[in-house]
Amino acid sequence: CLCPSPAMAREYFTHKGVLFPCLDFSPENLSYVENEFQVQDDDVFNITYPKSGTSWMREILSLIRSDGDPGWVRSVVNWDRVPWVESRPGLEATLKYPTPRLLCSHLPIQLFPKSLQRSKAKIIYTLRCPKDVLVSLYHFSKLLRYFRDPGSLDSFLEDFLSGNVVYGSWFDHVTGWMGLKGNENFFSITYEELQQDLQGSVQRICHFLGKELSEEQVAAVVENASFQSMKGNKMSNFSQLPDEYMDHQKGELLRKGICGDWRNHLSEAQSQRFDTVYQERICDCWGQDPVIP
Ligand code: A3P
């Protein structure tokens, strides 16, 4: 798909049952990433379902790598510091990235590079309360020019619950990746834990990465990865994203940055509808609740 016009830019295609935008994605690229991309032992992957704290974790990992020194996060845009593996420009940046690489992906596990299985690469999987993911994604979809208009919240809720959204079902994503829990190279954390205790979360991430930082360095990571710091940093807040990708007049990536904003948006009926599907797809099949507070 060449997506020559702005109208075409809102087109989607389905790859192995998962929806992707035409702009910057193609079935050929996704097949290459799945079957030929070589994961390296010293790669660190920031993996999330969209709107679960991807940019936040990108910032935390960048700052940990630079020992809390904010020079890197203030001088290089986040998609070059921690590129997307699966998008066309992201893959180009990934292939040029000197090792050890910090990489980012929203891919569901079944589309992730197969070479992961043979590697010692580290995976950090960040989850977020899915009702907040839904609300965040609903708003963000209105800003991205290459996403379809989400329509009413009611119809978007149904699309979200059935996986008829970019990157597919939240439920499949979470159950797929969380299946790696217990693997020594897999670490999961929630957006809510980051909110509750960023310092403790940074220390846990450092421990997982085998990285030692002093107390001052951890404090610098926490300070520079705060919502306010990131919102004011043009290298982290997506304000550098070209206008053809995002309508900057309509809103920002760093919208509210809170837990439980869904309560301000979902009606009682919408919330109950969500709970019914959540119960079936997560609680009943998992026997536990990984995220919903
Ligand atoms: P809201 O839309 O609820 O505000 P992603 O990076 O995966 O696209 O997720 C974006 C969401 O993470 C947005 O949520 C954004 O505000 C929030 N976010 C980004 N950086 C954050 C930070 N430092 N602290 C808290 N929330 C942050």
Image (spheres, grey):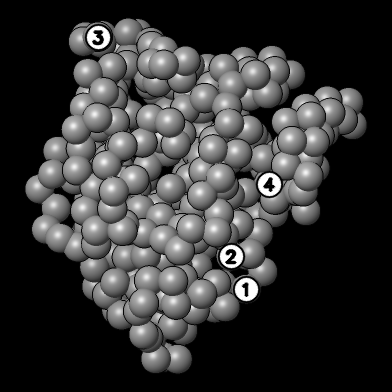
Residue 247 shown left or right of residue 93 in the figure:
right
Q: Earlier in the sequence, mark 4 or mark 2?
A: 4
3 or 1: tag closer to the N-terminus: 3
Please give the name of the residue rendered at 52% of the width and 25% of the height, measured from the top-left corner.
168
Q: Going from the N terminus, do you reach mark 1 or mark 4 first?
A: 4
Which of the numbered marks, if any, corresponds to residue 1?
3
| Residue placed most toward the observer, 24 or 229 | 24
Element assignment for label 2: helix
Q: Quarter-wise, where is residue 7 in the image?
A: top left
Work out whether residue 21 can be spotted. yes
Q: Is residue 78 visible?
A: no
Q: Amino acid at mark 4?
A: Cys
Question: Alpha-carbon distance for marks 2 and 1?
Answer: 5 Å
Q: CA distance from mark 4 to mark 2?
A: 12 Å
Residue 56's spot in the image, x, y percent?
A: 46, 57
Q: Is residue 267 above or below residue 236?
A: above
The image shows residue 191 at horizontal and vertical percentages of: 60, 56
Q: Residue furthest front?
A: 118
Which labelled disc corresponds to residue 129?
4
Disc marking residue 194: 2
> Do the CB atoms of the residues marked 1 and 4 lie less than 8 Å apart?
no
Relative vertical location of residue 150 with respect to residue 261 in this rendering, above or below: above
Q: Which mark is residue 197?
A: 1
Q: Is mark 2 within 8 Å of ligand 1?
A: yes
For mark 3, give the secondary structure: loop
Between discs 2 and 3, the one toward the N terminus = 3
Tell me if the residue at label 3 has its CB under 8 Å from ligand 1.
no
- Find the distance from the CA under tag 1 to the CA under tag 4: 16 Å
